[in-house]
Image (tube, helix red, strand yellow):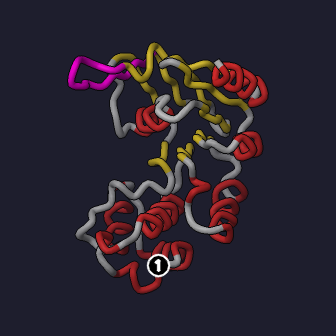
Amino acid sequence: MITIDDVSKSYPIRHGTVSVLRHANMRIGRGEKVGILGRNGAGKSTIIRLISGAEQPTSGKVRRDMTVSWPLAFGGAFQASLTGLDNLRFICRIYGTQAEDKIAFVQEFSELGRYLREPVRSYSSGMRARLAFAISMVVEFDCFLIDEIVAVGDARFHQKCHIELFEKRSDRAMIIVSHDPGYIRAHCERAVVLWNGELHDFQSTDEAYAFYDETSRG
C-alpha cells in the first residue's frame, strides 16, 4: 500500500510561496493501476516525485509499504561523467542487486550499441530515456511510476516498452501520468484529478474524465 495522508506541497517564489498541493489523500494498493489527470502545471509530476521520495511534502506523510520505482524514462539522476554501463552498475549496487547478468538485456533493450560504454553526458535526451527505461526493467519494483512514457522513442520502441511493462509486469501497481485519455483508459482502473491544488479521487476513469472535462471548460 502507498498512502498519501493529508499531504501539502508548496514552493518558495520571489514574492512568497506557491501552493501546488493542498491536503491531498490517496491510497494505492498492490496491483492497482491509477491515472493522474490535470492541466499543465497542475502538479502531476510533483505528486509523482513525492510518491517516489525524490521530494518531501511540506506537510503530511507519504507512506510506502511496497517498493516504488523512479519515474520511468527519467534519466536526470544519472552521473553524466560515468558511462551508461557504469551507471547501470552503480544503480544495481544501490538497490542491492547484481549488474553483470543484466548487461545483455540493457544493451539489447536500450539499443545504445557502443554508446553504452560512453559517458552519459554524450547522450541525447532520447538515449538517456531509453537507458533509464531499460534499467528500470532490471531492478524489480512493486509499483512503477510512469510519467508520459509514451513519449520515449518511436512506435517500435513503444511496443517493446508495452510488452515489458504492461504484459510481463501486469501484476504490479502503476501510477500513470499522461495527456492521452486513451492511454489512461487502456491501462488504469481508476483515476484522480488535480484541480486548483486539490486531489479528487474517482473510482473509475470515466468519472474522472467527466470531472476533468467539466473543470477544463470552466
Left or right of 172, for residue 147: left
Left or right of 84, for residue 33: right
Q: Does 133 appear above or below 47? A: below
Task: Give SS at disc 1.
Answer: loop
The span shown in magenta is 6-18
Residue in view at x 40 percent, y 69 percent: 124
Query: Which corner quadrant of the image does residue 214 belong to?
Result: top right
Q: Does residue 10 belong to the magenta stretch?
A: yes
> What quarter of the picture does the N terminus occupy?
top right
> What quarter of the picture does the C terminus occupy?
top right
Residue in view at x 50 percent, y 53 percent: 72
Predominant secondary structure, magenta span: strand
Q: Does residue 34 belong to the magenta stretch?
A: no
Name of the residue lying farthest toward the bottom: 114
Q: How many marks?
A: 1
Which residue type carries mark 1?
A: Leu
Residue in view at x 38 percent, y 67 percent: 88
Query: Which corner quadrant of the image does residue 55 belong to?
Result: top left
**Mark 1 neighbour density, 10 Å: few (under 14) some (14–19) many (20 or more):** some
Q: Which residue is mark 1?
A: 112
Using the rendered image of the protein, determine whether residue 203 is visible from the camera's viewpoint.
Answer: no
